Image (cartoon, helix red, strand yellow):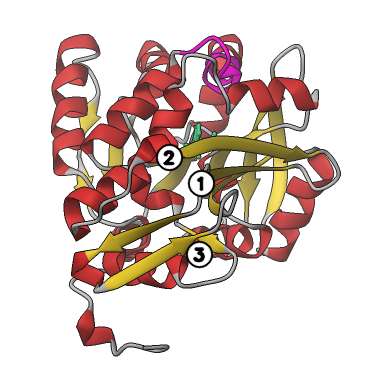
Amino acid sequence: MKNPPKTMFESAFAEDTYKGLTSYPKFLLSKYIYDEKGDKLFQKIMQMPEYYLTACEFDILKMNSSAIADYFSSEKGFDLIELGAGDGKKTKILLQELVNKNLKFDYLPVDISQHALDELELSLKKEIPEVNVNVQQGTYFETLEKLSEYNSRKKVILVLGSNIGNLLHEKAVDFLANIGKAMSREDMLFMGFDQKKHPQAILDAYNDPAGITEEFNKNLLVRINNELEGDFDPEKFLHWESYNPETGTARSFLVSKIQQKVTINKLRLEVNFDAWESIHTEISQKYDDSIVNWLASEAGLSVEHSFSDKDNCFKNYIFRR
Ligand code: AVJ
């Protein structure tokens, strides 16, 4: 069956998995890593010494919180809208500073997971009770659209953690342009971009010796087993990372150690792997100022300011329309 009808699939995950495993070369989409177990593994990754991104961005926010708060500030108050809030560890530095400065604002974390939002709201109540929290369950763009319809005061949109790095440039431009559509002239976008650096540091961040990143990557196979009745043996695949310093693209793969056949019942699919055949699973794009400026201009935005750590390991940019 080359082009099975849409109705054959029980979910987007099923459809995308079918497409990826019947393509050549094979691929899977990294967004499906993040079920409950994937979320937990990513929390672990953020605490690994090799995963420098989190510590670098934490330092940037810590060192520049006052200047950042001044950029955000608005006389009539503002809405701080965070796309993909996670556990809010980094955001809390900014929230504390905004509270210290007595600025008028509401914090609107946006996430697909109501559970993640509930936990964030609870921890904020304990740690920074002065913050008005107004959680938004939904997809980024539905929520942004909704908010730009109702709201007249300044919006500051926050995207931390270089989450944009999972998108190829063309998709990244779409992402930025979609955010831009929801922005008025006084609004701001504050976004993190991991920077090009020593290739070995990047390879180490995505290939830790403890194997946490490997487990994170293989969670795709585990999810296929659990949700689509697959029979992948994760042991029969190895995690492989590559980094191209010319394009700034880090790529993750799962490589079949042997020739093997995998059955996925709910897709009514048998997948054959040659020995050493790969499945591409994730990209983690690295940037420099000229790439970020180019992406911004393609999306109809411009860079107003940027903040970086002492080693230029990571940067947070402020964009306007
Ligand atoms: C959540 C997309 C920023 O690409 O660095 C971490 C995900 N993948 N280790 C990244 C990830 C492997 C992460 N982002």
Q: CA distance from mark 3 to mark 1?
A: 43 Å
- Residue at label 2? 236
Magenta-tinted stretch: 48-58
Q: Please rate how many residues cluster around mark 1, counting C-alpha atoms within 10 Å: few if below 14, some from 14 to 19, many from 20.
A: few
- Residue at label 3? 178
- Residue at label 1? 258
Q: Which mark is residue 223?
A: none
When the figure is inspected, residue 303 is found, relative to residue 144, above or below; the finding is above
Where residue 277 sits: x, y (%)?
A: 58, 54
SS of the residue at dot 3? helix
- Reply yes or no: does residue 144 show up in magenta: no
Most frequent secondary structure within the magenta stretch: helix
Frontmost of labels 1 and 2 is 1
Where residue 190 sits: x, y (%)?
A: 55, 38
Residue 195 in the figure: left or right of residue 140 = right
Where residue 23 sits: x, y (%)?
A: 52, 72
Q: CA distance from mark 2 to mark 3?
A: 40 Å
When the figure is inspected, residue 51 is found, relative to residue 255, above or below; the finding is above
Q: How many marks?
A: 3
Q: Residue at x 29, y 62 (%)?
A: 263
Asked if one can make out residue 80 in the rendered structure from this viewpoint, the answer is: no
Q: Residue at x 55, y 58 (%)?
A: 274
